[in-house]
Amino acid sequence: MSATFTDHQAALRDEVKKLLTDGSIKGFIGYARGRDSYHPVPAIVTRPDQVDGLILDQFSIFGLTKYLLDYIFEDGKMGIVVKGCDALGLGRLINDHRVDRNKVHVVGLPCAGVLNGEKVAKLGLGKVQRVTDKGSAFLVEGDKGSKELPKTEYLWDKCLWCENHNPAGADTLLGSEVENVAMKPRDFSDITALEKMPSAERAAFWTRQFSRCIRCYACRNVCPACNCRECVFDIADPRWVGNTVKLSEQQMFHFTRAFHVAGRCVDCGECERVCPMEIPLMKLQRKLQKDVIELFGNPKPFVPSEVEVLGQFRVTEDPEEFM
Amino acid sequence: MSVNEKAAPAAGPATNPTTATPAPEGWEPKIIGFACNWCTYAGADLAGTSRIQYPPNIRVIRVPCSGRINPQFVVRAFQRGADGVLVAGCHPGDCHYSTGNYFARRRYLLAKRFIEYLGVEPERLQVRWISGSEGQKFADTVRELTEKLRALGPQRRLRETL
Amino acid sequence: MLLTITADNLKSLLDKLARDSLLVAPVLEDGVTRLKPVKAASEIALDYSNTATSIKDFLFPQSEDLLRFVTDGTLSIEEIKPERAQVAFGIRPCDLASVALMDKVLTTGEYADTHYQARRKNTVLIGLACESPADTCFCTSYGYNPGHSAGADVMLYKDGDQYLAEALSDKGREVVGGPGEGLFKPADEAAGQAVKKAYAEKEVPFGKEVDVEGIDQLLDNFFDDQYWDDVSKKCLGCGTCTYVCPTCHCFLLTDEARGGEGLRFRCWDSCMFANYTKMAGGHNPRPSKKERVRQRFMHKLNYYPHRYHSYLCTGCGRCVAMCPVGLHIAGVIKDVKGVKAHA
């Protein structure tokens, strides 16, 4: 049993107010209430009078780190609240030399798992009054009912195999660190199942998924690893991916997007979560992760390191299939 | 044979999800070959000067190094009508730039598995180390690939229609 | 005249329509209900509050081929005209209303969009009144309602285990009298009117929260307000809102050529993309998210109303549900009213 995010809300507001008032940061990236209790949204505040709009609750899933790119050419520091998974995204941006660590004030949020708002919203508990951590479950009390929700069922998938419950290297930590153990081992069985599918069936599966894509680029825009100064999809000449929504272009888009972050993806799952057409994008990302683990003996390719998997090699240990 | 299955059984006939309609009369597989300037291109040249016969189905594009070959080039080639793609460069240890082919090796180990995962037959993407003295290997590789593609039929899955 | 049709007869009608023309209907696929061409009524999913994407996909498609050209010494051009007849089934009142808004832009005034016009002419819209509006729906804010039928050729209202039907146009009457012959029965007028009234008065909870009254005028002097700086910071810069919106209609016209053959097509573009206003020399009059976000909402709530006397939004709630960062039109309306009230 550990403190919930809501328990840290007051401390966060105090901290942000202090930092904004004494001028050590010029803005803070956090969360605000969304359309209901289950969908908190990002919020960027720049004035102390806005700070009371900041919230923290157990549904705060959004990875905020990509917003830092909006401020890299400005003077002054930005503050940001990060969970363990978000800290990996921040690490990605820092290791890619896109964000200067000295220009960020990191408020760390130890995390025992984030509740899947999409799932919990369907339970009809109404406006959430209180969430309590009961160890293996969260007790969610709403104005229309209460329910104890087992973590294994109601957390986001990535939280179940998370091994980064405490954000590393935070400037301020909210509360104290939580126990850092994965609830279950990382599971690639869905990927293996897809691999084993007959080729024609698998082709049909991806055709169905990609033909839904509306090319809104939300997946790209939210991804901390998709941080190129100019994106290949935005360059008009040469035009690598056409604007039409033909299947061949959709495939080119998804192949390129997924492969560009191969070995650099931090497994935050934000691409899949923000996709308005619910394309299982993490099934692409996790296939690449799985292969990286198997082929290059890197057990944790999603933890940013100085040199990424495809930026290095081993002369004799790497598999040789092309002789 | 599937690259995604570690201990794959003896390869059966290649299944092609995209050849529900048979190949048109007189169809010939089209191969785009990306050849590194320092080894494979010289190897292809040697095959020619040695008068080694190989199928004329390949169109060679000379690139500085196998490390230059972005997997996007491969997908683009498929998009624009290639039935197969050959990516070829110096043997590991022989790279003119010392390390380019080692990076290419990692990249294509992944890319090959990934295109198969997306439903493209992995046989369509052939990666080979072919040195400047291996004219025969170049010819053999092209012949093998051409035969495989003939069995698979036209590549339609990634093909773009204008 | 009000009619009724049983669920089974409706299925036979849809099967007939799917055989004779292109039938577009809601289909549930991997957890997403969206409009898609179907070959049989059995593919249709009826358990949805609204489809993820709108009827816009079929009247103003995301990409549409306009002409083909060949240059081999001389230039020959072949125009591609959308001629195929299509029937769209299960269109919700908000989407029916959106068609009227699109019509104003694309078919009135000095220039009419010939491709859009052709598709409109070849499309029969079968509307389906909303049984259970979603918690993101706010059509009532704009004066529409769950039974709003304007724009439909045939309107259906689910009534127990059968449907109340009304043919509202010549195209609709052709469906009812043609493929629908013998499948419809006359309805009891008074009972039918009561059903329609019940739908029209159905409660839309979120609609009560969003008051659009006078928002167009409130925005007249709002262009330079600090609000746009504040609200746009969280925009992700993706195109979700504009692409799922049934009324957004900005597009891009491009040629693609291989050798001497080419194709001119148009595809949707989004004012949320930085490239949208980027000019050839590199100048961008809407350089940051602030200008882009402001443009979208000003267009919907101020520019368009000034020109066409209605809001360019029907309260379908797609942006409310799908914007990844909760930056949607209902929120902006509430915010602007709040800012103005405090000013």
Image (cartoon, coloured by chain):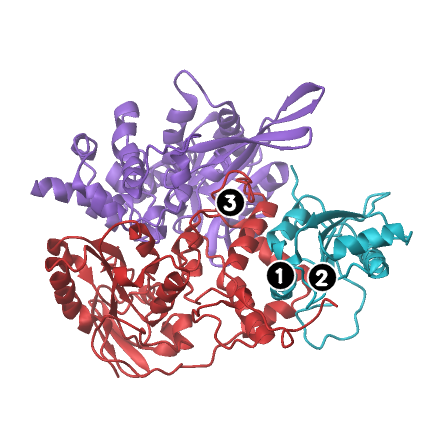
Chain colours: A red, B cyan, C purple
Q: How crowded is mark 3: few (under 14 residues within 10 Å), some or many (20 or more)?
A: many
Q: Is residue A250 visible?
A: yes
Q: Measure the alpha-carbon separation of dots 3 and 2.
A: 55 Å
Instruction: Determine whether label 3 and label 1 are within 8 Å by CB.
Output: no
Which residue does the image show at 26% across and 67% down from the upper left?
A: A125
Q: Can residue C132 be seen in this view?
A: no
Q: Are marks 3 and 1 on the same chain?
A: no
Q: Position of residue A25 (x, y in %)?
A: 18, 58
Q: Which of marks 2 and 1 is nearer the N terminus?
A: 2
Say left or right for B141 vs A64: right
Q: Are marks 3 and 2 on the same chain?
A: no
Badge 3 marks a residue whose secondary structure is: strand
Q: Closer to the observer: label 3 or label 2? A: 2
Q: Measure the alpha-carbon separation of dots 2 and 1.
A: 9 Å
> Quadrant location of residue C335?
top left
Q: Which amino acid does label 2 sit on?
A: Cys
Badge 2 marks a residue whose secondary structure is: loop
Where does label 1 land, which residue?
B100
Q: Which chain carries label 2?
A: B
Q: Position of residue A247 (x, y in %)?
A: 59, 47
> Quadrant location of residue C148?
top left
Instruction: Determine whether label 2 and label 1 are within 8 Å by CB.
Output: yes
Image quarter hosting the C terminus of chain C:
top left
Which residue does the image show at 24% across and 55% down from the upper left?
A: A43
Say left or right for C2 vs B148: left
Q: Nearer the viewer, residue C27 or C12?
A: C27
Give residue C25's mark.
3
Which residue does the image show at 67% across and 29% down from the upper left?
A: C261
Q: Measure the alpha-carbon separation of dots 3 and 1.
A: 52 Å
Give residue B90's mark.
2
Q: Which chain carries label 3?
A: C
